[in-house]
Image (cartoon, helix red, strand yellow):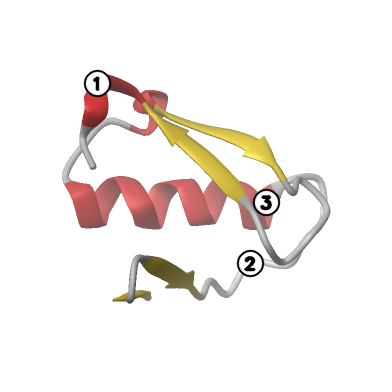
Amino acid sequence: MVVIENSKWTVKVRERAIEGKANKAVIQAISEKLKISKSKIQLIRGEKSKVKIFSIQDGIL
């Protein structure tokens, strides 16, 4: 589930934070919401944190 409020995105996934599975699920959810390829989304900061920063190629946002 992806919720956008005041430029802050909240993404909820069912996958556990084991071996990057939750991060991959977040990228999948964002790609579906924006209708872009997962390869255009890169995790910049927060690999092991609940707060994350992503880079999206091609200036989608």
- Measured in 3D between alpha carbons, the distance from the residue under mark 3 to the one under mark 2, in whole angstroms, is 6 Å
Q: Viewed as shown, does residue 48 lie left or right of 21?
A: right
- Dot 1 alpha-carbon crowd within 10 angstroms: few under 14, some 14 to 19, many 20 or more: few
| 19 left or right of 55 in image | right
The label number, if any, that marks residue 15 in the structure image: 2
Q: CA distance from mark 1 to mark 3?
A: 25 Å
- In which quadrant will I find the N terminus? bottom left
- Amino acid at pointer 1: Asp
26 vs 47: above or below: below
The image quadrant where one finds the C terminus is top left
* Label placed on residue 21: 3
**Hey, what amino acid is under mark 2?**
Glu
Q: Nearer the viewer, residue 33 or 57?
A: 57
Point 42% across, 69% down: residue = 8
Q: Earlier in the sequence, mark 1 or mark 3?
A: 3
Secondary structure, mark 1, is: helix
**Residue reaching furthest to the left:** 35
Q: Secondary structure at mark 3?
A: helix
Q: Which mark is residue 24?
A: none
Q: Are marks 3 and 2 in contact (CB under 8 Å)?
A: yes
Residue at 73% across, 67% down: 16
> Relative to 44, does residue 11 appear above or below in the rendering?
below
Q: Which residue is mark 1?
A: 58
Closer mark to the observer between disc 1 and disc 3: 1
